[in-house]
Image: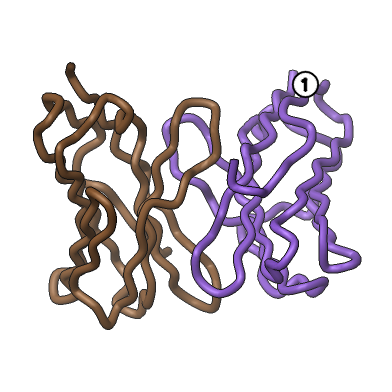
Amino acid sequence: DTGVSQDPRHKITKRGQNVTFRCDPISEHNRLYWYRQTLGQGPEFLTYFQNEAQLEKSRLLSDRFSAERPKGSFSTLEIQRTEQGDSAMYLCASTTINEQFFGPGTRLTVL
Amino acid sequence: GESVGLHLPTLSVQEGDNSIINCAYSNSASDYFIWYKQESGKGPQFIIDIRSNMDKRQGQRVTVLLNKTVKHLSLQIAATQPGDSAVYFCAGRVTGNQFYFGTGTSLTVIP
């Protein structure tokens, strides 16, 4: 257990539905990352927060994806109008300066 | 785009032998690297990191070597144990705070 938690651990949804995932980072970590990982691949960077500010977003991130970190603590990742290609593991990681600690991930299956 | 890639997708070693997992990166501006271990159904677990101003760093049973001339790093695991069986990823930090991951090497330890 790294101290980073994610909820839910698994989500099955129908195509076209919206889903929201939550990440609770290690409390003293001011930086929070979201990644997507598909089977057999390494995590792919999606977006990054420093405190409540979203500082970087992947150019590959569809406008159906949005992330927030309203109080600089927990973060949410929302996917609107889900597509089958969104099926993946969504990982959250938190850090202070360098070391990133990952949560267990949320596995999304879009039917 | 940026890439951090691994030479071999799979590696099998006898218990007690040393393991070497290799990784090549493409961006010479990468200033920091991390090795992660990922077991099935779990998030990546931090193993060891190295800054670009170093060429070697040792941890408990693990050593990371960095060769900036050929843009290559390796993870050495001493006296490999069955519990070391997992997928290993290298990640490099490039622009700002974005990390790029390779596709991973699956390590199998044969008892």
Chain B, colour shown: brown
Q: Quadrant of the C terminus of chain A?
A: top right
Residue at 21% x, 24% y is B109
Residue at 36% x, 47% y is B89
Q: Quadrant of the N terminus of chain A?
A: top right
Side of A35 where A71 appears, left or right: right
Residue at 72% x, 52% y is A62
Instruction: Say how the picture is coloured.
Output: by chain
Side of A94 where A77 appears, left or right: right
Vertical order, B85 against B33 (above or below): above
Residue at 81% x, 23% y is A13
Disc 1 secondary structure class:
strand
Query: Quarter of the image holding residue A94?
Result: bottom right
Query: Quarter of the image holding residue B70?
Result: bottom left
Residue that label 1 marks: A12
Query: Quarter of the image holding residue B52?
Result: bottom left
Q: What amino acid is found at the position of numbered circle 1 in the picture?
A: Ile
Chain of the residue displaying label 1: A
Q: How many marks?
A: 1
Tell me residue A53's x, y (percent): 79, 74
Tell me residue A2's x, y (percent): 59, 47
Tell me residue B101's x, y (percent): 42, 53
Vertical order, A15 against B37 (above or below): above
Chain A, colour shown: purple
Vertical order, B109 against B25 (above or below): above
Residue sitting at the far bottom: B53
In the image, B10 versus A30, the foreground residue is A30
Vertical order, B8 against A33 (above or below): above
Tell me residue B98's x, y (percent): 53, 68
Side of B54 where A85 appears, left or right: right
